[in-house]
Image (cartoon, helix red, strand yellow):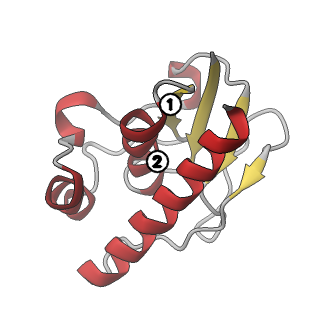
Amino acid sequence: MKKVAFLCVHNSCRSQIAEALGKHFASDVFESYSAGTERKPQINQDAVRIMKQLYGIDMERTQYSKLISDIPDPDIAISMGCDVGCPFIGRVFDDNWRLEDPTGKSDEQFVKTIKEIETHILQLKKELA
């Protein structure tokens, strides 16, 4: 089974959402990991709250902020978007989803970003199945 890493600088919002949705929708096709080049003390609390509301997923129960060196070597490395700076991972990204960071924005923006990530996850599942 392929290992897919969802990466952004802080590993606190978009990459954490992607890991959670990858596990939720595609754990039968690929293993999901998230990481960053820096750690945050906790996952973005708006992301945690909205993921619970939308999917019943408690990211704080199953996930934590990790560095790229904390996860297994991925077969596929996906950047969440380099609008806040792109992490260096020692190789080229396989894909860049170019997602806007919703941190500090409205719940509607969070939902929009989460739904975009869901669409990408389901497409990736289709491609890898």
Which residue in the protein does label 1 denote? 32
Q: Are marks 1 and 2 in contact (CB under 8 Å)?
A: yes
Query: In the rendered structure, which amino acid carries the disc numbered 1?
Result: Ser
Viewed as shown, does residue 60 lie left or right of 14? left
- For this rendering, which residue is in front, 45 or 23? 23
- For this rendering, which residue is in front, 106 or 66? 106
Q: Residue 77, image x and y in percent?
A: 70, 38
Q: Residue 113, image x and y in percent?
A: 44, 70
- For this rendering, which residue is in front, 78 or 23? 23
Location of the C terminus (image quadrant): top right
Viewed as shown, does residue 119 lie left or right of 105? right
Which residue in the protein does label 2 denote? 18
Secondary structure type for disc 2 = helix
Number of marks:
2
The structure residue drawn at horizontal position 40% and vertical position 64%, both measured from the top left corner, is: 114
Secondary structure type for disc 1 = strand
| 94 shown above or below 114 | above
| 49 shown above or below 122 | below
- Whether residue 8 is visible, yes or no, is no
Disc 2 residue crowd, few under 14, some 14–19, many 20+, Cα 10 Å: many
- Whether residue 82 is visible, yes or no, is yes
Q: Residue 88, image x and y in percent?
A: 73, 43
Q: Quadrant of residue 104?
A: bottom left
| 113 shown above or below 73 | below
Query: In the rendered structure, which amino acid carries the disc numbered 2?
Result: Ala
